[in-house]
């Protein structure tokens, strides 16, 4: 019997501006996503991934300690508990990226993974933290991830997560493949300009190089007062051959739903034996210095 997983990606704009309180901004974004999650469930999605730090603006465009107040513990914070309830209600695996508070003064950019019964399976903490050209001051907010590259066994496939800037580093993609990932989600917040040409280059190439499905998510809209650029959406799925399957629009809130034939992974790997032909004993210098 074919192993078909119906998966969904949600891209969304931030509805409230900076004149509102942090609590109102966060609640508005959560409420908006609850409706979009309902839409994904209505399209019979079995797995759904949200965008990077889904419940607010991309606040890394400035360096202000007030945003620390939006972080929550995982899994014991209110947002993950809500998502557990929604996962159970809809019978849908959820990948939920939020701002994680590990302890006082220690924060991570993290995605929690919840199964269709509402059980918390674990989390991935973003490894590669940018601090570059104006508007991406992430080292002010996030400690680099320390939990490796976990893969979560679900009834709808083995799921891995990589987050935004991580996508520029091939090592993590390969680690997820070696750990058995069949679907890797990359929730992002990326704007037009410097790296847009890479958006539909790197992730399909990583899907092909590692022979798994990739779900790439990007938010939409221009967030004030920073105006660092347009978040250009275009969320999509790529298959293990590196072919883009379905793409969202550039400007709209959207739910992208696609059927992923997990049997294709074995078909592709039977043709291209890259996991067999790897030479890990020759790569030691890559991790030195």
Image: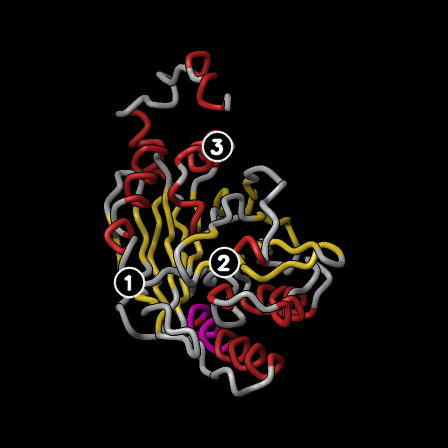
Where does the image place residue 157, in percent across and percent down from the top left? 48, 45
Q: Secondary structure at mark 1?
A: loop
The relative height of residue 85 versus residue 142 in the rendered view (above or below) is below
Q: Is residue 262 left or right of residue 141?
A: left
Foreground: 1 or 108? 108
Residue 2 visible at all: no
Q: Looking at the image, is mark 2 or mark 3 nearer the viewer?
A: 2
Which contiguous range is marked in magenta?
A: 35-41
* Alpha carbon distance from label 3 to label 1: 29 Å
Tell me if mark 3 has few (under 14), some (14-19) or many (20+) residues whose alpha carbon lies within 10 angstroms of its own.
Answer: some
Residue 34 visible at all: yes
Tell me if mark 1 has few (under 14), some (14-19) or many (20+) residues whose alpha carbon lies within 10 angstroms of its own.
Answer: some
Q: Secondary structure at mark 3?
A: helix
* Residue 37 among those drawn in magenta: yes
Q: Earlier in the sequence, mark 2 or mark 1?
A: 2
The relative height of residue 63 versus residue 7 in the rendered view (above or below) is below
Residue at image x 33%, y 39%?
206
Check disc 2 and report the residue beneath it.
137
Where does the image place residue 88, in percent across and percent down from the top left? 61, 65
User: Disc number at residue 192?
Assistant: 1
Q: Looking at the image, is mark 3 or mark 1 nearer the viewer?
A: 1
Tell me if mark 2 has few (under 14), some (14-19) or many (20+) residues whose alpha carbon lies within 10 angstroms of its own.
Answer: some
Check disc 3 and report the residue beneath it.
175
Q: Is residue 196 left or right of residue 93?
A: left
- Residue 276, image quadrant: top left
Residue found farthest to the bottom: 19
* Alpha carbon distance from label 2 to label 3: 27 Å
Q: Earlier in the sequence, mark 2 or mark 3?
A: 2
Q: Quadrant of the N terminus?
A: top left
């Amino acid at each position: 019997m074919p192993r078909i997983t119906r998966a969904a990606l949600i891209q969304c704009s931030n509805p409230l501006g900076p004149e509102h309180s942090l609590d109102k901004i966060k609640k508005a974004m959560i409420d908006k996503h609850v409706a979009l999650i309902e839409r994904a469930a209505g399209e019979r999605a079995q797995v759904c991934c949200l965008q990077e730090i889904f419940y607010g603006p991309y606040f890394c465009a400035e360096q202000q300690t007030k945003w620390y107040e939006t972080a929550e513990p995982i899994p014991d914070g209110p947002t993950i508990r809500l998502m557990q309830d929604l996962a159970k209600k809809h019978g849908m695996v959820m990948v939920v990226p939020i701002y994680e508070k590990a302890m006082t003064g220690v924060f991570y950019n993290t995605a929690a993974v919840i199964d269709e019964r509402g059980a918390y399976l674990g989390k991935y903490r973003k490894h590669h933290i940018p601090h570059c050209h104006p508007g991406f001051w992430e080292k002010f907010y996030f400690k680099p991830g320390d939990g490796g590259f976990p893969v979560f066994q679900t009834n709808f496939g083995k799921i891995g997560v990589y987050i935004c800037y991580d996508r520029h580093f091939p090592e993590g993609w390969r680690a997820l493949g070696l750990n058995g990932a069949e679907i890797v989600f990359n929730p992002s917040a990326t704007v037009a300009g410097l790296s847009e040409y890479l958006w539909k280059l790197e992730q399909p190439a990583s899907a092909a190089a590692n022979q798994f499905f990739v779900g790439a998510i990007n938010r939409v809209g221009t967030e004030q007062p920073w105006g660092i650029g347009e978040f250009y959406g275009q969320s999509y799925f790529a298959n293990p051959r590196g072919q883009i399957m379905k793409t969202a629009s550039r400007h709209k809130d959207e739910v992208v739903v696609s059927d992923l034939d997990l049997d294709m992974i074995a078909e592709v790997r039977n043709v291209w034996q890259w996991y067999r032909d790897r030479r890990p004993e020759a790569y030691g210098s890559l991790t030195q210095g």
